[in-house]
Image (cartoon, rainbow, N blue to C red):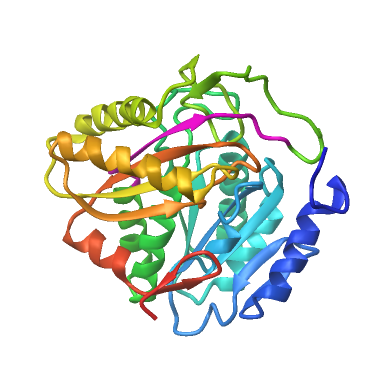
Amino acid sequence: MRMLINSPETVVADALRGMAAAHPELDVDVERRVVARRGARDGGRVGVVSGGGSGHEPLHAGFVGYGMLSAACPGEVFTSPVPDQMLRAAAAVDAGQGVLFVVKNYTGDVLNFEMAAELAEEDGLRIERVLVNDDVAVTDSLYTAGRRGTGATLFVEKIAGAAAEEGAPLDRVATLARRVNDSSRSFGVALSACTTPAKGSPTFDLPDGELELGVGIHGEPGRERRAMMPAREIAEVAMDAVLDDLAEVGPPDGPVLALVNGMGATPLLELYGFHAEVARVLGERGVPVARTLVGNYVTSLDMAGCSVTLCRMDEELLRLWDAPVQTAALRWGR
């Protein structure tokens, strides 16, 4: 195992210490594992809180800041944070307007956020929960009952955060977040397995010359394995899966927001080349693109590969996407 770490036992705490040193605008509680926006209660906004296992950086802590998340709860690598973390985060950012929990559809996250919501409500906080389940690859997996939450989490957090920044009430922020999730679909492809610090070896076996179509962000099995293909063929498979499923929502009524997301070990040279093929397929299918994001945003440690996420946009969602944001990993317009 060759990793730039001190030990598997301290890898999350060490990363949080580094984040605190690099971003003094954040309140990073290393011991209790909560990353919060400094002054999150100022202005009486709705709080937006998310979290999940570490290893998917910059998700979620990298998206804490102006116009996005109020706080994030990092768990151990590929392990849900515990309800106490979520409760602390909600209490830290609640300004009397309520808190939205953004929850990826993984069993541990769902159960723990549900428990945290119940505890918070007992303490007098108003809580809404939004489930992100955008992955079209499989219906059930090692971690989920139903579709997994992947790249659309970024879209939900950004648009919900922008609405909260504008002063929208809790029910409106939750409605927008659900609309984003319902309008989004994702599909992932692995060219290699990832290696967790605790295991020290690949989490699954992927023979040389093969790829996994529909892989999950924890290395969960996808739809099938095939011999390695050129980027144009991989893009066609991924886009067929996403667009066919998105068509079930109804006929296209506007442009899409597109995310080509690296899994952690794929360089931008390859990601931009892959996006060229995604853009080609969208053009051939007559799907207009309003905005595009290319890079590592919802990763899987050192996995090579990528995922594609599309979200159908309307005028309101596009305005909220374009609204200013300033976080460690996403920033524009301010």
Residue 247: image x %, image y %? 20, 31
Q: Nearer the viewer, residue 13 or 204?
A: 204
Residue 189 on the magenta span: yes
The quadrant in which the C terminus is found is bottom left
Instruction: Examine the rendered structure and indicate whether residue 203 appears above or below residue 175.
Output: above
Give the x, y percent position of residue 329. 53, 64
Q: Is residue 130 in sight in this rendering?
A: no
Q: Residue at x 65, y 41 (%)?
A: 302
Q: Position of residue 90 (x, y in %)?
A: 58, 65
Chain part drawn in magenta: 181-195
Residue closest to the eye, 293 or 119: 293
**Residue at 61 percent of width and 70 percent of height:** 36
Please give the name of the residue rendered at 69% of the width and 57% of the height, measured from the top-left corner. 85
- The mark tally for this picture is 0
- Tell me: residue 215, above or below residue 255: above
Q: Quadrant of residue 324?
A: bottom left
In the image, is 166 to the left or to the right of 305?
left
Assign the N terminus to one quadrant of the image. Answer: top right
Compared across the picture, whether 55 is left or right of 164 comes to right
Displayed quadrant of residue 263: top right
Q: Is residue 254 left or right of residue 262?
A: left
330 inside magenta stretch: no
Q: Is residue 320 visible?
A: yes
- Residue drawn at (25%, 34%) of the image: 246
Residue 13 location, x and y as percent? Answer: 79, 59
